[in-house]
Amino acid sequence: MHVIIAPDCFTGTLTATQAAEAIAEGWRRKAPDDLLTVVPLSDGGPGFLDVLTTSVPGDSSIVTVSGPRGAPVPAALHITTDEGGRRTAWVESAQAIGLHLLEVPERDPGLTSTWGLGELLEAALTLGVDRIVVGLGGSSTNDAGAGMLAALGAGPRDVLAGGGAGLIATREGDLVGLTAARERFAGIELVAATDVASPLLGMQGASAIFSEQKGATPEQSQVLEGALGHFADQVRRVLPPGTDLLSGRERRLDREPGAGAAGGVGFGLMLLGARRASGVEIVLEAVGLSGLVAAADLVITGEGSLDWQSLQGKVVAGVAQVAAAHATPAVALAGRVLIGRRESMALGLSGAYAVADREEDVEAAMADPVGTLRARAERVAVTWSPRR
C-alpha cells in the first residue's frame, strides 16, 4: 500500500512533524512493506512555517521581534518564487504573538500586543516581495491587530500597542497614520490565512469565543468586547467603509468572516487591504497534497482533538475533502475523538481513532504523546494494511 500521512499538530504535545513521524514509525512496525509519504500540515496556526519550509523550496531568514509582552523573540520569514517569478513572503503570526511564548501566569489578552507581528511584516516589506501570506492562529492577543498597525506607522505605540483592554481609550486622532500604513501595501497581495471564519465582534467574535483560552476571565471578555467595538468605531471615522457591490450596503470589515481570527488580527490585516483565505487550503495547495493523494491507497490525517471545530475549516476536514475528490479512503488519528460516527462520515472519514479512548487514558497520552500515538498507529495499521 501507498499511505499518505498528513496530520496537523497535536496542540500542546506534538508538532505536525513529530506527529507524522510517530504515526509513520508505528505503521512501519506492523506494515513494513507499505510505502509511506509523510506530509505534515497546518491550518495557519503554530507550525505553519515549519510545514512550508519543509515542503516548499525557498530562502528563510530569522529576525528578532517583540513578543506578546515585549520580550524579544526570534521569528522567521520564508521567501519563495513561483514559476511566474512571483515572490511570496510566508509569515506565521504565532512566532511573534503565540500563546506558547508565554507562561501561564503571563497570559492576559487585555495586555498582550501584536506589535511584534507588525515588526515581522515590516521586515517582509523590505524584501521586495509581490505577496505576503500571514498564517493566523494560536495567538495570545485580543487587540484587533492594533499593535501591529502601530508598528507599521498607523498611530502611537503607547495607545495602540498596550493590549486589547487599552483600546477603549483610542481616539480618532490616534489613527492618523492608518491610511498611509495601508498605502504601504499597495501593489502587494496581502493574504490572511485563517482557520476560523469568526467576525471581530459579537457572540461568535474574537472576545466571546477565544479570549478565555488566552487567559481572560468572563468579565474580561466583556471588557475586551467593548474595547474592540470602540476601536472599530474609531477606525470607521478615519477609514470610511466601502460599499458592497452586490447588496449596495456599507461593507463592515469587523463583520467579515475571519476578522476575528487571532484575536482580531484578521481585522487589522483587512484594514491594510488583505483578503481572507482558508489557511488549510493554502497549505494543501502549497505542498501539492492533491497530486500525492491521487497516487495513494490511503490517507491518514489527525490532530489533538477531533471535535466540532474540526468540522469547520481545520486540517482534518481539508484532507478528507481532498481524499474524497480522488475516491481515496481517509482515516484520522486524534488524541481524543469527540464527534460521533455520523459526523466523521459526513466529514469524509472512513474511520476516526482516539489515542485516549477513556478519560483516564488522557493523562497517560499527555505524559507520552509520541509513544501512545505510535502504539495507536500500530493498531490502525493492522486494520487497514492487508497482510501478505
Image (tube, rainbow, N blue to C red):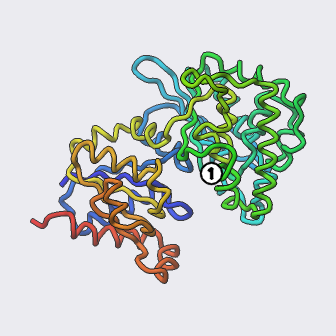
> Which quadrant: the C terminus?
bottom left
Out of 249 and 83, give the one closest to the viewer. Answer: 249
Q: Amino acid at mark 1?
A: Gln
Q: Is residue 153 visible?
A: yes
Residue occupying the point 52% across, 79% down: 363
The image shows residue 307 at horizontal and vertical percentages of 47, 62
Relative to residue 40, is residue 273 depicted above or below? above
Image quarter of residue 295 = top left
Total marks drawn?
1
Q: Position of residue 82 (x, y in %)?
A: 43, 23
Does residue 358 sit above or below 335 in this rendering?
below
Few, some or many residues within 10 Å of mark 1 (<14, 14–19, 20+): some
372 lies left or right of 254: left
Residue at image coords 76%, 40%: 115
Please state which of residues 359 and 241 is positioned toward the viewer in this rendering: 241
The one nearer the camera, 210 or 202, is 202
- Name the residue at 76% across, 29% down: 152
Residue that appears at 73% across and 49% down? 142
Quarter placement of the N terminus: bottom left
Tell me if residue 65 can be seen: no
Report helix, strand or loop for mark 1: loop
Residue at far bottom of view: 360
Name the foreground residue: 105 vs 76: 105
Left or right of residue 291: residue 218: right
Q: Is residue 171 left or right of residue 120?
A: right
User: Can you identify the residue that label 1 sits on?
Assistant: 204
Direction left: furthest residue: 388
